[in-house]
Image (cartoon, grey):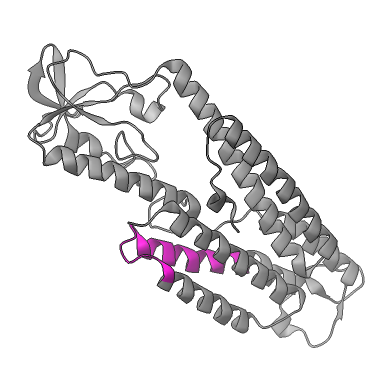
Amino acid sequence: MYKQSDIMPKIEKLERQIKVLIVFYAIYLLSKQELEKKIMALIIIFANSLPKDLINRQVYIDGVYKSSKVLINKFYVPTIHDIFTFGSRDTKPIDLLKVKKGTPNVIAYKRKIEKRLKGFNKWQLTTHEPNKKPISLWQMTELDLRHESQMKMVIQARTSNNDLFWLSSHADCSVRCEKWQGKLVSMSLPAIDKTFRTSEMIDGNIVYSFNGIENIVDKYGYKNNIINGFNCRHRLIAYKGEKNAPIDYSSKDIKRERLINAHLREYERRIRKMKMASAIYSNINKNISKEYLKNADILTKEYKRYAKANGFKPEMYRLEV
């Protein structure tokens, strides 16, 4: 069974390699075809390193390939166009294939590339699935692994001697799950109407169809509901005659854990962005590159202190780039 630590560092490493290559080939006016060949070689290595049983494995590979095309068109192509001008103040992009003579406008070029680099660091490798909103491959890894864990719970429920389960209930749950938490569901009975209720009612509780609820598709094309939804942490609790679903945590506990987790994820995002920026600037400005890396090291120490102070183990693989 693969883990987040098996996949996420590979995604960040590949994103860094692709971005560094694109910037390097742009600022040194190197061949686009050669750039694409080198990126394709990296993608092949990445694809071969992915676990064979990885959920949506092909989606990851396609996402990297299509995202690299987007990055080339958003940075390499316009940067190459910008460097050649016909006059000292003319910075209008032109088709290099039609240029017979021209002079590089170094000052204007430098200003444009520095401006473009600020946005380049924010671009990520994302999914490119038809009729679905793109999400980062990093995010997809978290969602897929969480989904797999949830689906194992569903399989265990389906193969148990119980047909009725409570959808666990806790304070401060997501809006997506709120309408379903605390409901009693049947693993086998079909829905009889659009509310996904079945023909059964027990102790005043409507019994809903689990299959009906799980197959709802959101506006972005995903089956993103309670239990099977993005990062959902609700559970299936076997029905044993209770009149209400058990409450897992207090409101105070949930709020505290969410706040700490939010801070940890923000630390991790900022550290990865700094490391990525350091790599991108490595071929352009060594001083800026070192400054980003220095700030990443400072923030990493803060991250470790905050995690340990709140009883969490620092997940260093989430900082790798």
Residue 306: x, y in percent? 63, 34
Dominant secondary structure (helix, strand or loop) of the stretch shown in magenta: helix
Observer able to see residue 262:
yes
Please tell me in which quadrant of the rendered image residue 275 appears.
Answer: bottom right
Residue toward you, 204 or 321: 321
Residue toward you, 287 or 301: 301
Residue 53 within the segment the image draws in magenta:
yes
Residue 252: x, y in percent? 47, 16
Image quarter in which the N terminus is found: bottom left
Count of numbered labels shown in the rendering: 0
Residue toward you, 300 or 151: 300
Q: Which residue is drawn at the image coordinates 80% and 54% (left, top)?
A: 291
Left/right placement of residue 41 relative to residue 300 reads left
Left/right placement of residue 271 relative to residue 255 reads right
Residue 231: x, y in percent? 40, 39
Task: Please say if 279 is above or below 312.
Answer: below
Q: Which residues are magenta?
A: 49-73
Left/right placement of residue 85 relative to residue 134 reads right
Residue 228: x, y in percent? 30, 40
Left/right placement of residue 59 relative to residue 266 reads left
The residue most toward the bottom is 100
Q: Which residue is drawn at the image coordinates 13% and 11% (left, top)?
A: 204
Task: Please say if 185 is above or below 300.
Answer: above
Image quarter in which the C terminus is found: bottom right
Q: Which residue is drawn at the image coordinates 49% and 27% (left, top)?
A: 257
Residue 6 within the segment the image draws in magenta:
no
Residue toward you, 270 or 73: 270
Q: Which residue is drawn at the image coordinates 18% and 29% (left, top)?
A: 196
Task: Please say if 159 is above or below 89.
Answer: above
Observer able to see residue 136:
no
